[in-house]
Amino acid sequence: MDVFGLLGNPVGHSLSPPMHEAAYDEFGMDARYVTFEPATDELGAAIDGADALGVAGLNVTIPFKEEALDFVEPDEMATRVGAVNTIDFSGETPTGHNTDVAGVRRAFAHHDVALAEQDAVVVGAGGAARAAAFALADANANSIHVANRTKSRAERLAADVSDSVGDQLSDGVTAGGLEALETRVSDATVLVNATSVGMEEDRSPVPKAALHGDLAVLDAVYRPLETRLLSEARECGATTIDGAWMLLYQGVEAFERWTGRDAPVGRMNESLRARL
């Protein structure tokens, strides 16, 4: 039996096990997906132990994504983003990958939104924001503006993306606080909320007045599926993408890397949404 799993702390809330096991069932695979919750200072031992026990692959979530870089051989994307969310044990040494970037890209593609030549705003500067910013940059967006409550974190992310892609973006990567967010979003064609705003309370990180019908809006929050941001964006005629699509497609990308099979996206999506 092949064993796959998730490293995080905490992981009890994770929807990854049923999503991945739906894929195993679709193909009749003798495989299981389990969760592991090592102490926050035991990540290296957990990865070594998984390797020694023959675990086939691991996803990595909070708070270990950045630290995992130190215990695997990261690929180019994981190195650029500065985070690992997928580990593959099929080689001589564990390799680290970042499928969150593909999760963003494939979520937009599923909704027929092309990211090339778009003027994008990313709200937030954490792991989801980094994935979104690099996805947009690699898709040849026209411009990316990173907005965050702590301006210095937005500036660091913008600098990392700029250093990675050089002058590939015609209007570059900029950063700022939240005070100019309304103006920035009013002029944008793509908006990504990569903060937790809207998860615990009925609140949006973006003023409704900034939303418009030419926007495509991805909210990384998936509980609830219909956040205030998405509800208000839909009212304005925008294309809206809930956070479960990003969660789904990062899992799809991991499954395909581990198994070499095309993932049963519909079956995985059905299993995921049945639990939301």
Image (cartoon, rainbow, N blue to C red):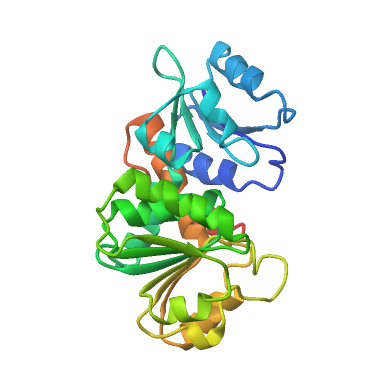
Residue 69 location (% of width, % of height) = 51, 28
Q: Quadrant of residue 90?
A: top left
In the visual, does 274 lie left or right of 146?
right
In the visual, does 182 lie left or right of 196?
left
Location of the C terminus by quadrant is bottom right
Task: Between residue 130 and residue 25, name the one nearer to us.
Answer: 130
Q: Is residue 276 above or below residue 75?
A: below
Task: Between residue 14 and residue 188, name the one nearer to us.
Answer: 188
Task: Between residue 22 and residue 37, name the one nearer to us.
Answer: 37
Tell me what residue is drawn at x 38 percent, y 38 percent.
77
Q: Quadrant of residue 26?
A: top left
Whether residue 265 can be seen here:
no
Whether residue 90 can be seen here:
yes
Q: Tally the marks.
A: 0
Residue 44 location (% of width, % of height) = 62, 20
Tell me what residue is drawn at x 65 percent, y 17 percent.
45
Tell me what residue is drawn at x 59 percent, y 21 percent.
47
Task: Between residue 219 and residue 5, name the one nearer to us.
Answer: 219
Residue 81 location (% of width, % of height) = 44, 42
Residue 196 location (% of width, % of height) = 64, 61
Q: Is residue 257 above or below residue 44?
A: below
Looking at this view, name the residue that lies furthest to the right.
39
